[in-house]
Amino acid sequence: MNPTVLAWAIAQPTGNRWRGLADAYTGGATRVTFEGRTVEYRSLAEIGQALAAGYAAENPVQRRPCIALARFTRDAG
């Protein structure tokens, strides 16, 4: 488990789906309940994958700005 992903999930408010997954992961449980729904995961690794996917979806990589130079000339002849 990526520590950055886990720290991000733990920082979410209580009741948030990512916080619920983080609490289950750190507690060693595979059953997660949030927003009145219960999900049974097959393993802690599967919870880790779900957390990584959530982190990636909510924290997209910043794109670097693209700069292009266009130059035009007109022949005088």
Image (tube, grey):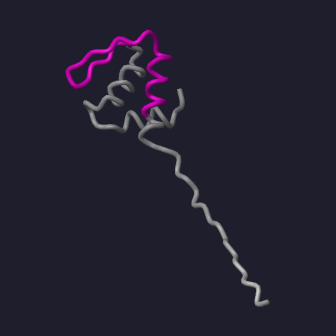
Q: Quadrant of residue 30?
A: top left
- Residue pictured at 38% horizontal, 13% vertical: 29
73 vs 38, left or right, is right
- Residue pictured at 79% horizontal, 89% vertical: 77
Q: Nearer the viewer, residue 40 or 19?
A: 40
48 vs 76, left or right, is left
- Compared to residue 31, the image places residue 48 above or below, namely below
43 vs 64, left or right, is left
- Residue pictured at 31% horizontal, 28% vertical: 17
- Compared to residue 23, the image places residue 5 above or below, namely below
Residue 72, x across and y down, in percent: 70, 78
Name the residue at the right extreme. 77
- Compared to residue 21, the image places residue 72 above or below, namely below
Residue 27, x across and y down, in percent: 39, 18
Residue 24, x across and y down, in percent: 37, 20
Name the residue at the left extreme. 36
50 vs 70, left or right, is left
Per the rendered image, the range of residues in magenta is 30-54
